[in-house]
């Protein structure tokens, strides 16, 4: 039995161009690519989407395109800035707009936070994805407080941060491979 080729979608949900969240997305995308995954990097700062109004937004061609991109993924890495101890509103909006495409996806998170006390920020999004879409959530996630970035704004992976990142990547790939090879069904 051959190992399935995996396709990852990495989403930067920060709306500020050139943000630290985008740098974090580049970091995880490069690592996943180095592990042999094909990568689709989505940057909401350069690929804007409408706000979810529950109706007309689903007629927008940009939403259709994003939904197809999410549907094609075996693994999704959601990279977001933390605002008020939660993922930013753009992360939730992205999930709401691409709603139908999330079923049975393996999902991992990278949180870019302004302090060291928001480390539980991924949980509201993880809970919604598990309950509403039966996603498999990678239990390790990268939490990046300001100290995780150097003076140039690049991610510094050392010590515990590097160890957690290595665990996250290994677990994400292992889960995505197992999930992709199980033979998805529409009523799973």
Image (cartoon, rainbow, N blue to C red):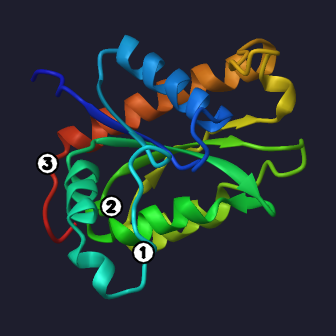
Give the mark nearer the N terminus: 2 vs 3. 2
Which sits in the foreground, 188 or 52? Answer: 52
In the rendered structure, are the residues bearing label 1 and label 2 in contact, judged by CB atoms less than 8 Å apart? Answer: yes
Alpha carbons under labels 2 and 3: distance apart? 16 Å
Vertical order, 66 against 114 (above or below): below
Find disc 2 in the rendering and name its residue.
102
Query: Looking at the image, is mark 1 or mark 2 earlier in the sequence?
Result: 2
Q: Residue at x 50, y 25 (%)?
A: 26
Is residue 139 positioned above or below 162 on the image? Answer: below
Residue highlighted by disc 1:
132
Residue 110 drawn at (x, y percent): 61, 40
Of the two numbered discs 2 and 3 in the rendering, the one whose residue sits closer to the viewer:
2
* Residue 59 as seen in the image, left or right of residue 174: left
Q: Secondary structure at mark 1?
A: helix
Q: Outermost residue, left direction?
A: 1
The image quarter in which residue 140 lies: top right
Between disc 3 and disc 1, whose residue precedes?
A: 1
Residue that mark 3 sits on = 183
**Number of on-image labels:** 3
Classify the position of the N terminus by image quarter: top left
Crowdedness near tag 2: few (<14), some (14–19) or many (≥20) residues, C-alpha within 10 Å: many
114 sits left or right of 40 in the view: right
Find residue 54 and report its horizontal and vertical position in percent.
38, 86
In three-dimensional space, the C-alpha distance between marks 3 and 1, rounded to whole angstroms, equals 21 Å
Q: Where residue 81 sits: x, y (%)? A: 68, 48
Image point (57%, 50%), residue name: 15
């Amino acid at each position: 039995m051959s190992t399935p080729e995996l396709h990852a979608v990495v989403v930067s949900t920060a709306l500020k161009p050139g943000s630290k969240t985008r740098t974090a997305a580049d970091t995880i995308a490069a690592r996943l690519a180095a592990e042999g995954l094909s990568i689709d990097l989505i940057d909401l700062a350069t690929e804007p989407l409408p706000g979810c109004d529950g109706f007309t937004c689903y007629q927008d061609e940009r939403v259709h395109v994003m939904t197809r991109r999410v549907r094609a993924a075996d693994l999704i890495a959601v990279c977001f800035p933390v605002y008020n101890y939660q993922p930013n509103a753009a992360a939730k909006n992205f999930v709401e707009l691409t709603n139908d495409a999330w079923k049975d996806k393996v999902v991992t998170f990278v949180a870019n936070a302004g302090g060291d006390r928001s480390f539980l920020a991924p949980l509201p999004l993880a809970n919604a994805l598990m309950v509403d879409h039966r996603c498999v959530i990678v239990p390790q996630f990268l939490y990046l407080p300001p100290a995780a970035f150097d003076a140039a704004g690049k991610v510094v992976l050392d010590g515990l941060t590097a160890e957690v990142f290595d665990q996250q990547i290994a677990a994400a790939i292992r889960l995505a491979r197992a999930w992709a090879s199980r033979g998805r069904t529409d009523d799973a």
